[in-house]
Image (cartoon, helix red, strand yellow):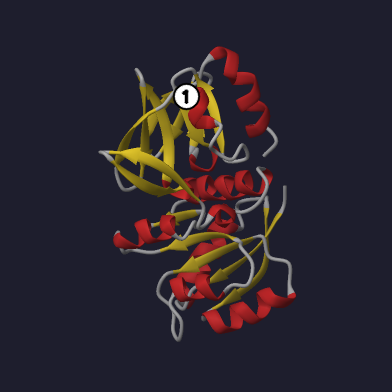
């Protein structure tokens, strides 16, 4: 799967360093590099771009302003040295957020996530604004789907693990997964449902999301690996 990408970063030295790292990934094809958001937006309107590497700090428009001005959703990997940008990136449905020093391994992981998103039926922004309504602590709350990392069974309850906090909801796993979009969420164990767009890595019996290990059951492995192996 070949991805057409662009890089938007105001620092020419950093652009050069990043391009050298990107060139080592044979699934990427450079379509353009830009120092500001205005030129990049004009280019995107007339060219096919699958993936955008975006600096959070730009002249004229910030990286987040750029995201809001895009007409169509894209896979976007945010480049930032500000920890607070990570949560906003997830809230906006960006593919990933990488902090310097940039490494080939970390970049390849983000690229794999972008490919997975495209394979699963669209970009990560396709769920921007979509929420699931739950009953939690005697009140109704709405959780953005993009913020959910995984769901786990806890007796008569399910526990939702999101980037903001954890929620306990009275529900069976079967009833809960029926509320979730199938191209984003997959049950990989009798006790776990994962957001496929958050998978960083996996082994023969585990899936890794945001530094956590989640068991992959034997009878769910084939379906999971069929999806992952298409990338």
Find disc 1 in the rendering and name its residue: 173
| Residue 42 percent location from the top left of the image | 65, 81
Quick one: which residue is furthest to the top in this view?
218
Q: Residues within 10 Å of mark 1 (few under 14, many from 20)?
A: many
- Residue appearing at x 51%, y 52% in the figure: 130
Above or below, 126 against 116 in this view is: below
Q: Answer whether residue 211 is visible to the viewer in this image.
A: no
Above or below, 38 against 114 in this view is: below
Image position of 62 (left or right of 27): left
| Residue 223 percent location from the top left of the image | 65, 24
- Residue appearing at x 73%, y 67% in the figure: 48
Q: How many marks?
A: 1
Above or below, 229 against 71 in this view is: above
Image position of 209 (left or right of 114): left
- Residue appearing at x 31%, y 39% in the figure: 136
Nearer the observer, 71 or 227: 71
Quick one: which residue is furthest to the bottom in this view?
60
| Residue 119 percent location from the top left of the image | 68, 44
Above or below, 162 against 51 in this view is: above
| Residue 10 percent location from the top left of the image | 46, 78
Q: Answer whether residue 22 is visible to the viewer in this image.
A: yes
Q: Secondary structure at mark 1?
A: helix
Nearer the observer, 195 or 141: 141
Quarter placement of the C terminus: top right
């Amino acid at each position: 799967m070949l991805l057409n990408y662009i890089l938007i970063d105001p620092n020419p030295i950093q652009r050069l360093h990043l391009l050298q790292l990107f060139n080592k990934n044979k699934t990427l094809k450079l379509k353009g590099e830009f120092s500001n958001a205005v030129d990049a937006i004009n280019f995107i309107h007339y060219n096919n771009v699958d993936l955008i590497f975006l600096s959070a700090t730009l002249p004229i428009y910030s990286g987040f302003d750029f995201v809001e001005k895009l007409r169509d959703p894209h896979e976007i990997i945010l480049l930032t040295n500000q920890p607070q940008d990570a949560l906003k990136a997830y809230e906006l449905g960006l593919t990933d957020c990488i902090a310097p020093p940039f490494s080939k391994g970390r970049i390849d992981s983000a690229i794999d996530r972008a490919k997975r998103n495209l394979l699963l039926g669209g970009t990560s922004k396709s769920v921007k604004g979509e929420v699931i309504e739950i009953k939690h602590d005697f009140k109704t709350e709405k959780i953005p789907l993009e913020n959910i990392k995984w769901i786990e069974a806890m007796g008569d309850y399910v526990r939702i693990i999101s980037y903001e906090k954890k929620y306990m909801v009275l529900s069976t796993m079967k009833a809960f997964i029926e509320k979730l979009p199938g191209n984003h969420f997959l049950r990989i164990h009798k006790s776990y449902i994962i957001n496929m767009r958050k998978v960083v890595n996996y082994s023969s019996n585990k899936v890794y999301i945001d530094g956590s290990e989640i068991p992959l059951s034997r009878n769910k492995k084939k379906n999971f690996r069929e999806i992952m192996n298409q990338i």
